[in-house]
Amino acid sequence: MAKIPLPERGQPLDVSYIYQLANAINELSTQVSPATYKYVTVDTTGVGKQSVKASEARIIGGYVEVVSSATKNPANEVAFSYDFAADFKYAPIVTATPINTGGSDAGKNVSVVLKSITTSKVEGIVKFNSTGDLSVAVNLIVIGIPN
């Protein structure tokens, strides 16, 4: 979008300047159109579906290193948590994906379970389904409505 030059003090506002203002406002209104595809709907716990403009939603991509070069077996679980940079109005939707950062066969056989999701934090555990030396991290996608 074009920037409009600021007028000098005492400068008369002519038709050209007013045209630039109107044109910039029109461009801005098309960029923040109320079209339905520009909305994000988050199905919140207890409150139901909440819709906001996509520009008003908050999306966070998080990364947590859970285990680094450790031997684990199926009896082991490791807890992790991730604090959000800012609070959400409602508990957000969170998706967690394990990453086999060590490349071992044991690292391919893990599960992630989210235990708690609040407006400021997600907590979960990584369960190991085979024995071996591994390194595992978790990628998080968090989508919600900011406070």
Image (cartoon, rainbow, N blue to C red):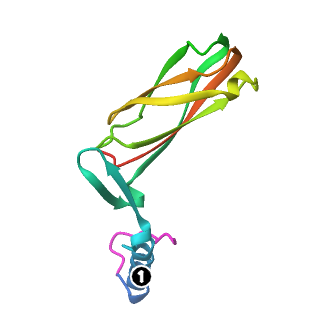
The answer to whether residue 8 is left or right of residue 74 is left
Residue 19, placed above or below residue 107:
below
> Residue 16: x, y in percent?
44, 86
Residue 32 in view, yes or no? no
User: In the image as oriented, which residue stretches furthest toward the left?
Assistant: 47
> Residue 127: x, y in percent?
55, 22
Circle 1 is placed at which residue position? 17
The answer to whether residue 144 is left or right of residue 1 is left
Q: Which of 136 and 132 is in front in this view?
A: 132
* Magenta region includes residue 127: no
The magenta span reads 1-12
Taking the spot 35% from the left edge, 82% from the top edge, the residue there is: 13
Residue 121, placed above or below residue 3:
above
Q: Nearer the viewer, residue 78 or 13?
A: 78
> What kind of element bears circle 1?
helix
Q: Tell me the quadrant of the picture where the C terminus can be found.
A: top left
